[in-house]
Image (spheres, rainbow, N blue to C red):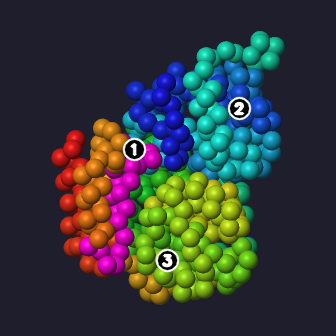
Amino acid sequence: MNLKFGTDGIRGPVESLITPEACLKIGHATGFVMKELGWNTVVIGKDTRISGYMLESALQAGFIAAGVNVQLAGPLPTPGIAYLTKTLRNKFGVVISASHNDFLDNGIKIFNDDGEKISRDIEKRIEKYIASDLIPVETSKIGKAYRFDESGPRYIEFCKSTVPSDISFSSLRIVLDCANGACYKVSPEIFEELGAEVIALGDNPDGYNINQGCGSTHPELIKKEVIKHRADYGISLDGDGDRVILVDEKGSILDGDDLLYILAFSNPNRTGPWSGVVGTLMSNLGLEDGIKKLGYKFKRADVGDKYVSKMLADKGWMLGGETSGHIICKDLVSTGDGTIAALKVISSLLLLEKKPSEILSNYNKIPQVNKAVPVFNKDIINDKDLKNLIKEIESDMTVGRLLVRPSGTESKIRIMVEAPEKRVAEKFVADIEKLIKSKL
């Protein structure tokens, strides 16, 4: 089996890669590695994809065959599992989800007992076990499985606890898009219990409609609904709840860069753990400039929230995130959490008594154009003609940035160009896309 970890776990089509057999092997291999590290119990959560039932059973069997006990949390946001692995102690966590992908895909994400995604060293150890034969432990040592019915309520109470007691949402009307995914039940309850009037969208999953025309990859839906309902905010989560896009009362879409800037602006501290902010290679140059003008240091990590988290740990900083909406507030959570990021942004704005537009007027983004080109083989990134074109474009750019990279979660090549004029960025993206397609 060619099962390898990407930027966010192991992910791919259910019919060809993330099969029941694959999950049996992943569970067995992960179980043995985690036992070597001293963890004998795993908490398993999932999103709402139809394949989740099938893969959960196979994954569970693999863990039990490795002698690991299993707690089944059912549908729960990815950051909810991260939270549980940390608070329950001496356990690790697994999420069955393909995040923002459609229902045809699924994947496996793994967290350590600190609620953080496992290191590359641990991933390599798991990959090595996957390649070996599956041999169960002796019968007297096989694991057991239990239902963990309190997972949702525990996560709800935790999220509510991150909002200061003197902050009330009772004056707010919020449109909340749950992407027909893992947040469909818990997130509306969180905002309602904090006092907000909630208009929920994407809260009727059927196993097939996850991320379908909704969620953080389709913010145009919530933009329309915010204007229609004259709401104060729109919150658009993705299928597993680890990323978020906001919309303000005017219908302006706020991506991860905007949310990072609001959180940095709102924080009065610029020292110690709050002296720096981490973005990624995709973060807008305007964000970097704006963050530095606020008095922070700014560093870029590789694309992927686990790389943002690692750099935060290395620097000892508290705030980081991705343009796509993965926001990590280390003072509250160990990983990207869309619901908690939204709570913190809105709480900060209420405390400052400011609209998002008032704060965001303090920094200017450079026009950025992004394109994802579907490919059969991502090795095309090493094509000689493509490399020459990239060098040629870079030599023509006096201001701006160019990034061409293979997607870590899909069979696509991602192109990003920043330039002072949008039309220039669009031309460079079109030239690169044309060359890639000519090579297919």
- Which of the two discs, 1 and 2, labels the residue nearer the N terminus? 2
Image quadrant where one finds the C terminus: top left
Could you tell me residue 293's position as x and y percent?
54, 87
Residue at position x 64%, y 21% from top? 61
Could you tell me residue 355's position as x and y percent?
49, 83
| Residue at mark 2 to residue at mark 3: CA–CA distance | 39 Å
Residue kind at label 1, given as amino acid type = Glu
Q: Which residue carries the number 3 mark? A: 288
Residue kind at label 2, given as amino acid type = Val
Residue kind at label 3, given as amino acid type = Glu
- Which of the two discs, 1 and 3, labels the residue nearer the N terminus? 3
49 vs 27, left or right, is left
Q: What stretch of residues is rendered in magenta?
A: 396-416
Q: Which mark is residue 33?
A: 2
Tag nearer the camera, 1 or 2: 2
Q: Which mark is residue 410?
A: 1
| Residue at mark 1 to residue at mark 2: CA–CA distance | 27 Å
Could you tell me residue 176's position as x and y percent?
48, 61
Residue at position x 58%, y 60% from top? 308
